[in-house]
Amino acid sequence: MSAARIFEALGLDQGRLSDGDWVVCSPIDGAEIARVALDSPEALEAKVARSVEAFAQWRIVPAPRRGELIRRFGALLREHKSTLGALITLEAGKITAEGEGEVQEMIDICDFAVGLSRQLYGRTIASERPEHSLRETWHPLGPVGVISAFNFPMAVWAWNATLAVVCGNSLLWKPSEKTPLCAIACQHLFTQAMAGFDDAPDGLSQVVLGGRETGVALADDVRVPLISATGSCAMGRQVGARVAQRFGKSILELGGNNAIIVTASADLDLAVRAIVFGAVGTAGQRCTTTRRVFVQREVARVLFERLEQAYAALPIGDPRKAGTLVGPLIDARAFAQMEHALQVAREQGGKVVGGGRVLADRYPDAYYVQPALIEGGGALDNSFEETFAPVLYCFAYDALDEAIARQNAVPQGLSSAIFTTDVREAERFLAATGSDCGIANVNVGTSGAEIGGAFGGEKATGGGRESGSDAWRGYMRRQTATVNYSDELPLAQGVRFG
Ligand code: NAD
């Protein structure tokens, strides 16, 4: 589907596809699909001011009523699921199933947020003083700035937006400059959900289009108490420092370098399927992509051979075509980074299987690649970095402790998995001395998390948590209140004063 057809199906003004100078290209064939207008610093200023005003109104709307708005939004997402999925495919290059899967993830988080809108529970706490009550209340925070990456051009915003909105906040979304159309489409449906919903103020949710400088301006703005930023570790290092400088809060969801450990007791059929999906799904461009495999030496040869066979049969090509499993990389830069990683691996003695550009005759301006497997002897320097492409480093190990230590030896700490049928190995992996990642799975791969759990990772992944469980607390401020209903004024800790 073309961008024009998608906009028509969503009821979006076609003028938005040619109202500026910023060129948007599809990674499918490199062709231009739109020219959109970016926001000037003055426009950003006006949007932040509107967001502050919208917050002042929205925070007094009862939370279950706020949930009703998200319920309406979720209904629109359901109605337009395949069209939105097609837009993700067109702009980010995901295969159809993954594009639609991303929309499903938005629908799921809407359902979660609707329920949450009646469960923003605080605690009552036993006071040490007679006739006193002690309680915690969660209050809305203010305008929430969302900075998002190209590879989840809709869902990352939805994880943040749905929770932030039921928590009583307004939203300012700076999407990746590579995927502005996805943002325009989501914003349009959100605005539609607001139509006839009188409690929802104008400016409750706004998109700010721009590049790095726009993200920096948002991160520096004291009127935006929370910045939730998803992207590379390099971006997070800058955004985190800038927001901390002004005592703002941040939720950082940054790069991953995720590993799967396969022990000798593992069900290899499961392991191979999980590794292949995790390593080549979304052409290796997920934060949770499997980038390293540690396999116990007894089964290493057989696993490597099975992976090589599976890799040789991967259907690579147009992500819109049924049967395709590996679509394009986002752009030429991503391809150059993949080439560089493979070059370094070869220089350091790694055996590289696969890699290289394919379908270049048919798509001279797009970047389809053969996913690469690297069998490494010792350490391969680039295996410590996140190369955002389908590059999988495979290492053999002897003892589980060694595998866990090597898994944990990278800067990032997002997702991890073990394949084993031995309960002791599984529990050691999940123990305090096991995986140091925010996500640790047993007989489940590193990618494809459900929205019900809190999502995020440790160390250079940023430490933030989004989505399910109690991640909502990140979007609110906590107030501890002590109420004295006695006629005395007893002090805490039994202190006597005067
Ligand atoms: P990126 O860091 O290049 O850009 C992400 C966003 O940050 C964009 O909107 C960009 O304009 C903005 N930005 C860049 N530098 C900035 C700065 N200094 N100040 C403010 N904003 C800035 O990332 P990308 O290439 O779009 O996405 C890929 C990266 O995102 C990978 O590292 C991937 O692992 C990570 N990612 C993480 C998660 C997660 O939940 N942990 C999810 C998706 C993607």
Image: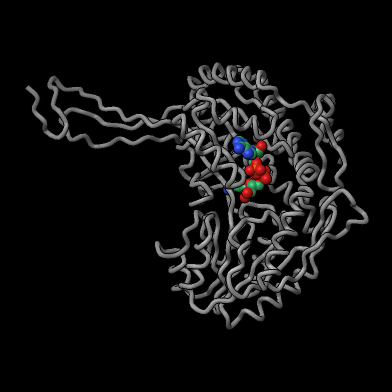
The colour scheme used to paint the residues is: one colour
Looking at the picture, does residue 199 appear above or below residue 295? Answer: above
Looking at the picture, does residue 150 appear above or below residue 326? Answer: above
Give the residue at the far front of this rendering: 347
In percent of width and height, residue 455 lies at 53, 48
Q: Determine the residue positioned at 84% across, 55% down.
A: 322
The number of numbered badges drawn on the structure is 0
Q: Determine the residue positioned at 75% across, 49% down.
A: 333
In percent of width and height, residue 465 lies at 50, 45
In percent of width and height, residue 285 lies at 69, 53
Quadrant location, ligand no. 1:
top right
Q: Is residue 142 left or right of residue 234?
A: left
Residue 480 visible in the current orientation: yes
Q: Is residue 452 left or right of residue 23?
A: left
Give the residue at the far bottom of this rendering: 298
Q: Is residue 249 left or right of residue 393?
A: left
Q: Determine the residue positioned at 49% across, 68% down.
A: 404
The quadrant holding residue 341 is bottom right
**Between 108 and 448, which is closer to the camera in this rendering?**
448
**Between 158 and 433, which is closer to the camera in this rendering?**
433
